[in-house]
Amino acid sequence: MSNFSLNNRAGNYFMIDNRKQIILFFFFTIGLIYTGRLMYLQVIDNKYQSIDGGSAIRREIQIPLRGQIYDRNGKLMVANVEVYDMYVTPGKVNNLDTLRFCSLLGIERNFFDSTMAVASKYSFNRASVFTRQLSKESFARIADAMVSFSGFHFEQSFFRTYPGNTMSNALGYIAEIPKEQFEGQTYYRKGDYIGLSGIEKQYEKELRGTRGVRFKMMDVHQVDKGSYAEGEFDTLATIGTNLYSSIDLAVQQLADSLFDGKVGGVVAIEPQTGEILAMGSYPTYNPNSLSGREFSANFKALSRDPDKPLINRTTSSFYRPGSTFKLVQASVGLQIGAITPSSSFFLSAPPGCHGHSAYHMSNLHNAVQKSCNKYFYHVFRKILSDESGSSSFAASRKGLQRWHDMVQLFGFGVKLGVDIPGEKEGLLPTVERYDKVYGANQWKFSNVYSLSIGEGELGVNVLKLANVAAVIANKGYWLTPHLVKGIGQRNGGIDKELTKVHKTGIEPRHFEALYEGMQDAVERGTVNTYRGVIPDIAVCGKTGTSQNKKGKDHSIFIAFAPRENPKIAIAVVVENGGFGGSAAAPIASLMIEQYIKGKIERRAVAEQVKALNFSTTASQKAAKPILQ
């Protein structure tokens, strides 16, 4: 081997050896830096030593006040009251004088034992709630004495109050986080409050705010010696964001008074925006009963109530729409050319067509005004027929599919997207459903004709009925109904989906054809004129009587007002209220008056409506055909 090769190889070894030394030196230097820093933090710097040891430092969570909720006019609907919660860390409880402790707090020994057992099972070294919602006065009374009891500490908290005392189902409630929600997350502690229904649940992240942390120096007797390190490591809590709802509190409270002694629901919407002006489910309950120390007992009582006040009937209970559905039927028929406003049908007998005599030749205006069942029987038959007028198996199947797709655009059979949890889709029959029941190509119009007047396999909630009124008021479109119009401000900040426009595909001129009949239905038709007509306001409405096999039928009414530039669309359902014009229509009429005029001038009518009572026994209520 040549000298050149040997020298070259030696040079390479030397270079590799230098690189190794450089790399080793680099890692050794980094190691020294980390080791030195760790020694400084753990041995030299007593600040971090104290925090790590925890013997003299208490870490306190600062719970922020929850965001408040206002109505559309700035009236307070949901507020907070500051209280104190007591926490216990079982591992730090030493030499406890149990009898003195129980006497100080005014609690029973069995409560103490059971609560400590639960806390110990959860964690021996982590704090959990011992008792909740001590008032400022109670806290002040026992605070000094509590220094004698190690392992216990207080955190400032709050509970909800409801100045408006209304809309319990839609607003919802807060309670301790359930076990299934607690597991698998890191933000909430055991015993923390969280929104469990309604707006409180839907807007939990906005309402809850951001928690803070404060470190406090404690002596061996757990006496507070002040802020640790002058608050250098503290973080401030951030108050939750206020919500501004679309609710008109005066209209909402009027609905509560009018529904006294009645079961059902009401929803009112501003048509041009989709903002919900009122949403009431009845019978209701005092929302304050589910806020405070008696939550568990009150919730249990409400859940056992045969009237089911915890169910939000406006979004969860289904009713057959009855004759109110005739407006949708007419719209579809007009759009596809099955009828025109002047279309007439030979009506062979008076039943099912209020105020008509036998052999009367009707038209769309009269049919809407008098709610003529047989007229809409013919309309639906023509919708399902083919171009030749045949209603054969094949023609009915094809016609029903087209009908289904058009009706669905009104919001039937789908969720509207309202901003509270629990909304259900409802029922809108499909071709597949009838194929399953009767067999493919084994059914036709004669099997499904009950759909013509809103009966049969249709199921809607009160919200959908109000949305139909909004569609007609807007002449063919609707915006997603929503309860919150502003987050942190009067208007704006809400999800864009809540302002989305949904088009039905029905031309505006076809809705105009319905208006005259709807106005006449209120002024000289199926509505009780004395209770339904509002002086100086043109109301367009439609009554409905939803069939009920057990007990009286359900009373339904949908409307919008005024006729020109509508400001409110409304739906009212009164269970077992009978004819739509006798129970539901007067309630809607008074709420329209309150919203548009800002007051009730027909006080005699209001008192008469309040006096109406459609209560039934618990057994009858259990038998009602409400599809849950």
Image (cartoon, rainbow, N blue to C red):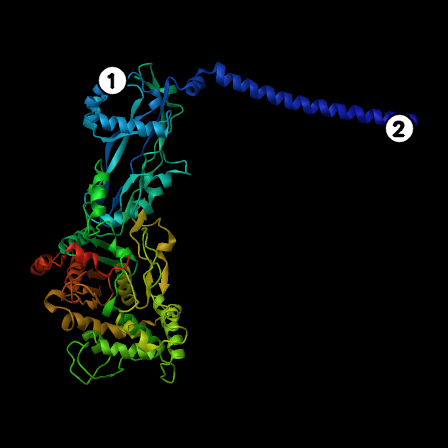
Q: Is residue 400 above or below residue 565?
A: below
In front: label 2 or label 1? 1
Instruction: From the top left corner, tell me how far across and down residue 445 is, in percent.
Output: 33, 77
Q: Residue at x 35, y 55 (%)?
A: 498
Q: Amino acid at mark 1?
A: Asp
Please tell me the numbered disc located at residue 201. Answer: none
Q: Residue at x 18, y 72 (%)?
A: 521
User: Of label 2 and label 1, which has the lower sequence position?
Assistant: 2
Count of numbered marks: 2
Quadrant in the picture for the N terminus: top right
Quadrant in the picture for the C terminus: bottom left
Q: Residues within 10 Å of mark 2 (few under 14, many from 20)?
A: few
Question: Which residue sits furthest left?
Answer: 604
Whether residue 217 is visible here, answered yes or no, is yes
Locate residue 272: give its quadrant. Answer: bottom left
Q: Is residue 325 above or below residue 350?
A: above
- For marks 2 and 1, give the CA distance: 90 Å
The residue that label 2 is drawn on is 5
Q: Which element type, helix, strand or loop, lies under badge 2?
A: helix
Instruction: From the top left corner, tell me how far across and down residue 17 is, in percent.
Output: 76, 23
Instruction: From the top left corner, tell me how far across and down residue 421 is, in percent.
Output: 32, 51
Q: Is residue 5 above or below residue 417?
A: above
Q: Is residue 299 left or right of residue 151?
A: left
Please tell me the numbered disc located at residue 97. Answer: 1
